[in-house]
Image: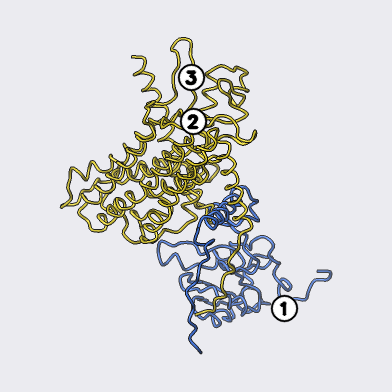
Chain colours: A blue, B yellow
Amino acid sequence: MAIRVRKQVEFSFYEKSYLPEVARGVFVTLSHFFHNLFGRRATRPLQTLRYPYERRVYPQRFRGQHRLLAREDGSPRCVACYMCATACPAYCIHIVAAESPDPKIEKYPAAFEIDMLRCIYCGFCVEACPEDAIRMDTGIHTPAFLRREDAVVGRVDLMSLSGQAGTPPAFGAQNYREKKPAGA
Amino acid sequence: MFLVVSTLIKLVVFALVFALGLAAILTWMERRQSAYSQDRLGPTRAHFFKLFGRPFVLFGLLHIVADALKMFFKEPFIPKDADRGIFRVAPLIGFCTSLVILALVPFGPDLVTERWGVIPLQVARIDAGLLLVLAVGSLGVYGVALAGWASNNRFALLGGMRASAQSVSYEIALGLTIVGVLIAYGSTELSAIVNAQRGLVHGFLPNWGIFIQPFAAVLFFVAATAETKRAPFDLPEGESEIIGYFLEYSSMGFGMFMLGEFIEIVVLSCVFVTLFLGGWQLPYLIGDTSSSFLFGSLFGVNNSVAHALDGMLVFGIKVFFMCAFQLQVRWTLPRFRYDQLMRLGWKTLLPLALANIFATALLTWWDPTLKILGHVGVAMILMFVLVVVAGPRRVPAESHGH
């Protein structure tokens, strides 16, 4: 590619006189000033939010803190299939499977822990889950931890969270082995 | 005795309450106004308590308090090899000289009272007022130059040197632009200049300096901004290259320089308003002795007190907007290079100021009633507006990615 030599910009007398351009410049900054001062919040150029006190509404697909969904009887939807733990590129999910007391269900997670310090919030676990048991729709940022142990969030805590407003209900029937109740 | 008391009261009300108060508010305005001009929010954090779950920041005004507290409680550090005496005195020099200028500015019409006679609303009515403004104003640079020298720091010295060179260059232009005003109004006493700006030109335009001497007004504003080391002329500070003459100052020593800068803004605004914006006068609304502006109309008393209050209010409003304009200019323009600064001072402002004197003298000699001067002035303003609105615009050259 040829080297382009840019010529020195020649200023006209009008531009060298400087003042008209200064006046225009002041007009530009003043227009920003007044737009921001009196303009409507939605349309003004100034869009800063005072973060901890004002929060942006996150989109539905924002990946925040995980949560585990429950069946209607309160037991976890998770069947301890290890799909999420396998899909996880950060190896942050630790599951201990145990036999489910419900004869229709094979396993349940006796322990389901996510190491929040390792998680990269990729959402692969959500995609991998066949049961719609894990979601990242809480809209919560990772909280700050004082100790490393606190960063490992267990099953009870994960199930205590709920999705942010407007999240769709869990797909499928209460139990995928059961048939859909009529009319549902 | 009465003279001493009334002078002291005027001094306290005008110099301490008005000027220093406005300077303190300007430290906030500078941040807030610049932020809004640049689509930022500005100061929002300093607060004492929370109200409705949010910190009570009062538009960021509490930053003034936070700044003052911080300044006072820091260690006033003096470098080992600094000249201790001069180092301590230097911040005071610039600060005091600015305040002295305020004493000469009339901030309201004469107050006529039955008991005490006529009280001029001006701390010192001195016949050589305008000359004293120039003389004292040029003393201010000693503070900067001495601060740079006494710090025993090469960057501070550079800042002080730049300040003195800049001051010398622009003082001449400053003095010469004022000559045009002197020719037109025929007095160096500031309240006489304000009184001379009474009345209307062409029956509707106020007889203000900015309409009689628009060219001088622009030149004066530029030169005076350079004198106060602000806006595009802040080379003595030049925080991105040499940090500035106050480099070694901490605590309130630095605070004095910072506050001094804002007081200089107020002082420059006061002088500009006095010379070019009719001082405390407002045509149509404020007359010779009566007023139908805020106080005059609100309380229905058209006595001298209402007149004086209205005059002071108008003066304050004008000064405030002048200050805001200076801040806006500062946040619009980038800093000059040093050679550009010198070229502008010596090769542009100086000849133009001389030309302005010549033209003003000629037109005043032709028509001592200043009518023709007013015609020319208004024509120049209209031409400038036309050029700004309809002048050619350079389309930015298409730049390819490098």
Cα distance in 3D space between marks 3 and 1: 96 Å
- Please give the name of the residue rendered at 57% of the width and 31% of the height, measured from the top-left corner: B282
Q: Which residue is mark 1?
A: A177
Q: Residue B277 got which mark?
A: none
Q: Which residue is mark 2?
A: B194
Cα distance in 3D space between marks 1 and 2: 95 Å
Q: Nearer the viewer, mark 3 or mark 2?
A: 2
Q: Which image quarter: residue B367?
A: top right
Q: Amino acid at mark 1?
A: Arg
Q: Amino acid at mark 2?
A: Val
Q: Chain of mark 3?
A: B
Q: Secondary structure at mark 2?
A: helix
Contact, mark 3 vs mark 1 (Cβ under 8 Å): no
Q: Are marks 3 and 2 on the same chain?
A: yes
Q: Nearer the viewer, mark 1 or mark 2?
A: 2
- The location of residue B37, given as percent across then percent down, is 53, 53
Q: Secondary structure at mark 1?
A: loop
Q: Chain of mark 2?
A: B
- The location of residue A15, given as percent across then percent down, is 52, 62
Q: Amino acid at mark 3?
A: Leu
> Quick one: which residue is furthest to the right in this view?
A183
> Quick one: which residue is furthest to the left in this view?
B81
Q: Tell me the crowding category of disc 2: few under 14, some 14 to 19, or many 20 or more residues within 10 angstroms, Cα based.
A: many
Q: Are marks 3 and 1 on the same chain?
A: no
Q: Tell me the crowding category of disc 3: few under 14, some 14 to 19, or many 20 or more residues within 10 angstroms, Cα based.
A: many
Q: Which residue is mark 3?
A: B111
Q: Tell me the crowding category of disc 1: few under 14, some 14 to 19, or many 20 or more residues within 10 angstroms, Cα based.
A: few
Decide: is B332 above or below B135.
Answer: below
